[in-house]
Image (cartoon, rainbow, N blue to C red):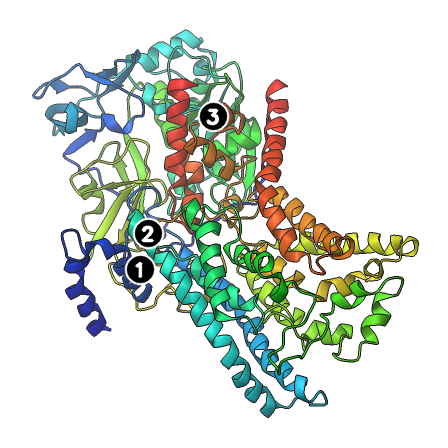
Amino acid sequence: MTQIKIRKGHSIRIAGIPQKEILTNLSTAEVGLCPIEYRYVKPKLFIKEGDHVDIGTPLFFNKENPEQIWGAPGVGTISKIKYGPRRVIEKIVIKLDKHEKRFSYKAITLNTIAKLKREEIKSIISETNLWHLIRQRPFNHVANPEDEPRDIFISALQTAPLSPNLDLVLKGQKDALQAGINVLAGLTDGDVNIGISANEQIEELTGLVNCNLHQISGPHPAGNVGIQIHHIAPLKPGDIIWTVNIQHVIILGKLFLTGEIDPTIIVSVGGPGAKNPIHVKTRIGAKIDTIVNDQLEDGEYRIISGDVLTGKKVEKDDYLGFYDTIISILPVDLSRPFLGWIQPGSSKKTYSLSRSFLSFGRRLFNFTTKQNGSKRALVPINAWEDVLPMDIMPNPLYRSILADDVEEMTQLGILECDEEDFALCSFVCPSKIDVGATIRKGLDIMRTEG
Amino acid sequence: MKFLRNIYKKAHPHFAEGGKLSRFFPFFEAVDTLTFWTDEQTKSGPHIRDSLDLKRTMIVVLVALIPTTIFGIINTGYQQALAIDNTIVLTMELLLKYFWVGFQSYLPIMVVGYATGFFWELLFPIIRKQEVDEGFFVTGWLIPLILPPTIPLWQVVVATSFGMVIGKMIFGGTGKNIFNPALVTRAFLFFAYPGNISGDEVWVKAADGFSGATPLAVPAAQTGSDAVTLLSGFQQFDYSWLNMFIGWIPGSVGETSALAILIGAVILIYTKIGSWRIITGSIIGLVVTAIITNLFAGHSTNTMLTLPAHYHLVMGGFLFGTVFMATDPVSAAYTNRGRWIYGFMIGFLTVIIRSMNPAYPEGTMLAILLMNAFAPLIDYFVVKGNIKKRMARYAK
């Protein structure tokens, strides 16, 4: 077991931390799958409105890579296919059957899974159309089944604000977890690397075999899988690494162990706008309002599928993002304090990593969706560098992307980056620059030109 | 404050698109967001943001400048009184009196400087249809502090205009300039009106004909002697180390008190607004270079070479320049290793110009401007170093 200490970064002290308690709420009558949330995918539908689908039934495939097929997340009838501007498929809604009769595959024992051949594993994942559980680096998009990944990385350390408590999430899942690891180990000649917390012991994560455990300590973004790859075995040009969310490892494991696709996941609901921050056991693609139904007070709120740094703004009738395990709720504050930027500041009203406000104490802060300033040209006061725990120079990289300089971007290591690792840079930037969006722009350029 | 908000609400349609004054919208926006902090909401990227914005960044620098400003104003009045009677002993009462006397010569420079600066700061965004940025808060505050209290006001107008337009606006405003605009202002005066401001004669507001040498000019004027002996033997002003450290000497308004500047440096470093790497780097550069020149002092008749490092530190504009000018994040190097090199070179060049160049007794301004010009080159090599390291790792 290796030890990795991450020093740079910052764990945001946001209020509304979810309690260590799970509410079971599987009452969602509909589930949704949003093709637009998968990067670089041109979807082509297999189904039309009114069709009945089983869990795992192919819904659409990627025109650019027909091997990538998305299966239905539930048993029911396709009630709606919503198109956006330029006929982009925004979401596919499935009205669930009252009694879901799930199709069952062959159940395999834990020890046999470890002996399966790569082709056998691949064919089972392909048959259930679950490849989108696995993503690849560079570019952070859905894995291509044809690739041979150098290694596979799983982060079992949650540092993002308001993340679910892993102790709670993993309780009783040790076999499924081990099965999932065995499946993934069969997909690579390299290692399955798991980043775990150095400070917190989780029973289910001890004694795992067929993988390398790395103890990681430090503030956010230490839990980001991109940061862990960078510190354990960085990407080189030409490398492909696969990454899987810890809860998706369990889904994969259960699929092989029981022969069934179990779409339940545990989501944390929190943030300063949440009335009762808690964990909710729900299912992939659940409708947002079934999760947040009694969380909101009167007033204006922003609901975010994902964490407050990298998540996506959603409405109540949207669906939980496929890779998201957090629902964050933030109040919208439209007040305009008189001479606010000159005021000394207090731990109630201001939160800053620079010490330019008089805010003492380490209390949790009620964040709102306020930007706290207007966008300006870049003034490099070293704020970005202090929260990026990578051997990457964010400022020159940012400039090279703006200059469209593919060669320099490559040399500065853009392929090792993902926008989520730069979210804290945008958070602290005094010029309110969205650094992550620029990193993504650079990756897009690299993908088409590099 | 509702009253004020209502006025803005009424005025808004006139400035908004289609209104009679829509050309002047940047002006309206600037006044509006200065009085009431913006309620802009996050759109993309992180949904929550740090409370620090550029307005706040600038205000912190102003707060750091307050000690040296107050000291400078008092000192201006004090020096004026000393010119008439140099036996005065300072009391609390006199401090207030001198503050008032000094304020009378400081205020016009500041008002004229700010007025000129804001004129350009508003004119360009209005023509370019951009938002007004906050850079001039600091630049405008710095300008009177780096000028002598005796400066004619028309020179302030001409120099500030030059500094703003050539030093900043033609590049696109704050964040895009190559040189520190306040220093460009100072350099313009330095080269355009050398008779008034070359830095060998003191500036004290006093009767005509009053003159004297600045501390740096004292050892520079004499060859084959020892700098410390010359300074301590100087009759007209008290040029002992302690007095220069505290700052009761003639000079530009803000530069004389090393003590007050160091308080500002602590504020800048504590709040993480100023780069401690640049400040430390330049002090190390100055000390190391001064020690080296001292070693060579025996082989030359140049008295400046004998000046010890701790004297270099408190004399002239070095500390002020390094704390408040060199740390300007836009014109400085932007990589961390680059900041060390950039700072070190400023300290090095300051001593070199001071001791090797007979024409100018003071070298800080030129050292910083020169390093402003070289900062991109330093960054270039630092970035190349990072690339090389990565390429070596890839090759493994």
Q: How crowded is mark 2: few (under 14 residues within 10 Å), some or many (20 or more)?
A: many
Residue displayed at 64% across by 46% down: B342
Read off the residue under disc 1: B30
Mark 2 falls within which chain?
B
Read off the residue under disc 3: A415
Read off the residue under disc 2: B125
The answer to whether residue A350 is visible is: no
Give the camera-side residue of B184 and A326.
B184
Q: Are marks 3 and 1 in contact (CB under 8 Å)?
A: no
Q: Residue B298: x percent and y percent?
A: 92, 56
Going by the numbered disc 3, the residue's amino acid type is Leu
Labels in figure, total: 3
Give the camera-side residue of B273 and A352.
B273
CA gap, disc 2 and disc 3: 38 Å
Q: What element carries label 3?
A: helix
Q: Residue B104: x percent and y percent?
A: 50, 81
Going by the numbered disc 1, the residue's amino acid type is Ala
